[in-house]
Every structure is written in C-alpha cells, then in structure tokens.
Image (cartoon, rainbow, N blue to C red):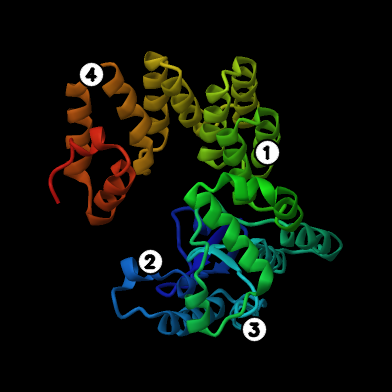
Amino acid sequence: MQGTQSTPMSDQLMMSYSALVDQVIRYPHLQFYAASPSEALSRFGPKATPLRMLSMDLSIIEMCQKRSGTKVDFAGYIRSNAPQRSLFHTALHPNGEITAMMVRSFVQQLPGDYDYLLGYIEWYLRQSEGINCLTYHPVSQSLLNELGFDWGESYDAYRSMLEARRSGDWGALIDREAFYVSKFPNDTFTWMSLMQAHAAIGTLENGKRCLSSLLDLSPGYLYAWTDGLGLLHKHNDQTGVLELIQRAKDFFIDQRMLSQVMAYFCLSSGRYEEAEAHGRNYHSRTPDRADALVPWLKALLALGRTDEVKRVVDYEVSIAGVARMADIRANFSGWPDLKAYLPAE
C-alpha cells in the first residue's frame, strides 16, 4: 500500500514501486497561508495579502481534494470553521481537528469496515494538536479583523500566553499557570512556556513536571529535550540530566533523532568528541536536512577542527540549490561562528 499526496501539480506521486503495491491511497495537499503573512510573503511575494491568500488557500484545497478523490470536504470544513477558531499551526501544519479528518479520508479508502475504531481515533486526535513543533501563532487581532475572523476570548488568552513567553514575562505565566493548563493542556507551547518560566524563577520541581508533560506530548520536538536539559543544568540537577538522557534513549532507541539529541546533550556538557561522533552520525543519516549540519559543525569547532568545518561547508554550498542554500542560511542564522563560513549573500 502506498500513500501519496495529491497536489496542485499532480494527482499522485508515482514511485518506482507503485506498480507493485496493492493499493494507492491519495490524500489532498492542505494549506492555510492566510493567517501567516510572513510565510505568504516569503513564498508568494508582496501581493499575497491575507484575503487573497484565503481565497487561494480554499481554491487549492478544493482542487487537491478533487484530485485525490477523497470523500471528505476539507475545503468546506475549513471555510466554515476557520473564522471561528484556529485550525493550523503553520501554513502547512494542520491541528488535530484537521488531522482527524485526514485519518478518516485514509480509512475510507481501505478495504473493510473500520467505523468501530474510527470514532475513537477521531475523538482522540481532535483533542491533540497535530504537528506543532513550529508555529505562526500568536496571530494578531488586526490580522483576524482583516480576515473577518473572530477566534474569541479563548484565543485572546492563548495569545497572551505566547506573548508573555516571547517577552520573558515569567511572572505573568506563573500567575495564570493553572488557567493555561486547564485551557490548553494539549498544546506544546503551554508546557514549553511554563517550563521556561519555572526555569527562570528557580522552581525546579515544577519545571521538571512541565518538562515531563512536554515530552509526553511532543517527544519529537528537539527543543523540548534541549530546553529541558538547560533547565536541569541551570539548577545543577545531575540526576535529572542522567534521567533525561535515559528517557531519550528509551524513546528513540536507534532512531536517527537520538543522535541529534545526544549531540546537543554532549555539546552542552563539554563532551565534544562524543558530540562530534553523534553529530556526524545524525548528518550521515539525515543528509537532506540542513539542521543536521549544525551540531556536527559546532562540535568540530569546539574541537578546533576548523579545516574540516570549512571543507564540509564549502562542499554543501557547492551542491546547494537556491532552496537548500536558504535552508542552510536559516539554520546557521543563530550561530555567528557558523555563518562566518558561508559566502556573502
């Protein structure tokens, strides 16, 4: 069985093995650039106004769902419900509500009757957040007004939480901790915000509780691990550090992300030889991702192996297309020591 996305360009992606599978399940490309002006600007240019993007988003979803043959009307659902509440985390990352619909679209294409399971799965996913490691939130009230959207008092509270995190107003987060947990218990940035607040004011045990909830919810989010490590290092909790490392090993086992997490863990504790080995392993297993360069190169710099850093960066630049080069620059943007090895823009 092959799953393939129906996009504005094609009904389905044909692979070398497509003729060998029993069934191809198609699902539609979904997007919502309307609520993310920065993503729309970088992708489509200055004429991509929110209202124009909203019209384009819905038209493209309609086209893609028609091409996929799904029985689920994603465009109609988003058109009716997006004005009342947020349905996406980024332009291409829907929340759990839309993810549940995607699962229904998949299941309806399978042979057999799965209705007895589907109801529970949809209920569970609707309470989740979908893919939420990146986010365009908080969406400003002025943008919502321009779109004619009213996301209500609940979103006002969510915006306040994210703005307090962004400004480092840790006291405001702690003061409303119980409210945020009760209101947004299945949101990555609730627990990330509260963990960072407790780290800042020195309440270690509460911070560790938030970290545990964060990792339960989003174990695939790199910064959940690295920020958690920062909390433990800041308060010199070596037992907590060892427990966090073991939790990562137990969760990822031999997945490539374990090498990424361990590279950052070793970098933070000054174990640069180990960091280099983990970073090199992650890069070799993830050559398509520019972020895989960062921990490896940081470890090489820490070891003083600058010639190797230059050789790796020069090679990556020599084979990079426009999109890849932009990705490399974006991932190096927070590291002046790595940016220095890139050619001038």
| Place of residue 214 in the rendered image (x, y in percent of width and height, measured from the top left) | 65, 41
Q: Along the polypeptide, which appears first: circle 1 or circle 2?
A: 2
Circle 3 packing at 10 Å, graded few (<14), some (14-19), many (20+), is: few
Residues at marks 4 and 3, CA–CA distance in whole angstroms: 57 Å
Going from N to C along the chain, the mark reached first, 4 or 3, is 3
Quarter of the image for the N terminus: give it.
bottom right
Mark 1 lies on residue: 210
Horizontally, residue 49 falls left or right of residue 112, namely: left
Q: Residues within 10 Å of mark 2 (few under 14, many from 20)?
A: some
Looking at the rendered structure, the kind of residue marked 4 is Arg
> What SS does tag 2 mark?
helix
> Who is closer to the viewer here, 48 or 182?
182
Mark closer to the observer (2, 3): 2
Which residue sits furthest right?
116
Q: In this rendered view, identify the residue nearer to me: 75 or 205.
A: 205
Q: Residue at x 57, y 45 (%)?
A: 170
Please tell me the numbered disc located at residue 305.
4
Q: Which residue is mark 3?
A: 80
Let me know if residue 321 appears in the view: yes
Give the label, 1 or 2, closer to the camera: 1
Nearer the N terminus, badge 3 or badge 1?
Answer: 3
Find disc 2 in the rendering and name its residue: 38
Say which of 316 and 129 sits in front: 129
**How far is the residue under mark 2 from the one under mark 3?**
24 Å
Residue at the image position 53 percent from the left and 35 percent from the top: 227
Q: Is residue 262 above or below residue 155?
A: above
Q: Contact (CB < 8 A) between labels 4 and 1?
A: no
State yes or no: discs 1 and 2 in contact (Cβ < 8 Å).
no
The residue that appears at 30% across and 28% down in the rendered structure is 297
